[in-house]
Amino acid sequence: MSSNSISSGLLIAPIQLNIYLGLFIYVTGVLGSIGNIIIYRSRSLRGRACSVYLFWRSVVDFIYMNSILLTRILQKGFKIPIMTRYEFLCKIRQFGSSYGNQLAFTFLALATLDRIFLAHRSPGFRRWGNRVPLAKKLVIISYLIWLIALFHKLIWYGGAANGKCEAQPGFYAYFDNLFGAIVTCLFPMIVLTILGILIGRSVHLVAQRRRVVPAVTNDGGTHGEQSAIQKMDVQLTIMLFLDIFVAMISFLPYAANLIYGNITGNWSKSALQVAWENIIGEIINLLSYTFFSTSFYVSIISLTGFRDQLLRAIRLKKPKIMIHSRTGITINKTAQIQ
């Protein structure tokens, strides 16, 4: 079947997908990243190691949306030859795509580990949870490790002189495909699956710990603050569990499509099959960006106080102060902003 016999709708569908679906993911992702950056730097959350990781993940998400996804929309949607015209942009985008992907995955994994340690029965493990100085060091180490591991893309990607942006043909192209399938897709899936199981158990343990907390305390009224902190810890743990679920449904189809492309790359295919594979491939590739664009909305769903925290952080809602009465009962009052 020749391309002339294929409907124009099938041929133009990948372009339309990159414009409309791509722009939708881009706008929601940028707004969500800004919201996350604001909230994780708020006074109530920035003292947690988990928030350190999630803050830097939000920064990565914001940069990823405005560089990797935006250039994809311009190149494949509006047909502006950015990567295929400028060699350095080709190299930077290929490196940045993998770099941002691995950093976002690493920060999510570290935040999840922090929650797992905090919920562990063993005091020795709990001692490793919520260590903010350690979290800041691990963020820097993560940036350096993935910079070294992915630096090869800045050297052996190119082809803009021939109107392409691809790995150098031969052994490196094979290595890059294998590296992408294993390191970028399969390895994160295995790690996130294990962490998802562990943090699922952590949610149960933290919930049990909340149930055994006495309802009334006589220690000067600190129970209200402790209860609020414990509630936030449970919600952060649930949020990370949902984040891992989103990551799984974002990465698995992408990994499967990448492996399928490597296996069937040299097969003989009809023009109709190629057209449908292009459409399905574009949908899968675009939906993989939901890992970077949905964190804010997962937070809104799983954290009951997230919207209030956001409104307070941007000064649209008056902050609350805690007042302890003589009876030990904690009372919430709204502070007056002068």
Image: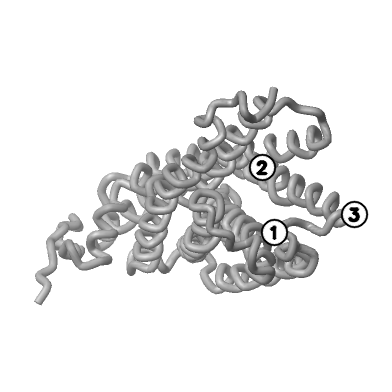
Residue at x-position 52% and y-position 69%: 132
In this figure, which residue is indicated by the disc labeled 3?
Answer: 171
- Is residue 123 visible in the rendered image? The answer is no
**What residue type is disc 3 on?**
Phe
Q: On screen, 316 above or below 256?
A: below
Instruction: Give the structural element (helix, strand or loop) at label 1.
Output: loop
**What residue type is disc 2 on?**
Met
Picture coordinates of residue 98, whole percent (x, y)? 66, 58
Name the mark on residue 155. none
Residue at x-position 50% and y-position 45%: 18
Viewer-closest of 160 and 155: 160
Instruction: Give the structural element (helix, strand or loop) at label 2.
Output: helix
Structural distance between the alpha carbons of marks 1 and 3: 21 Å
| Number of other residues with Cα within 10 Å of mark 2, as a class: few under 14, some 14 to 19, many 20 or more | many
In this figure, which residue is indicated by the disc labeled 1?
Answer: 163
Is 170 on the left-hand or right-hand side of 223? right
Looking at the image, is mark 1 or mark 2 earlier in the sequence?
1
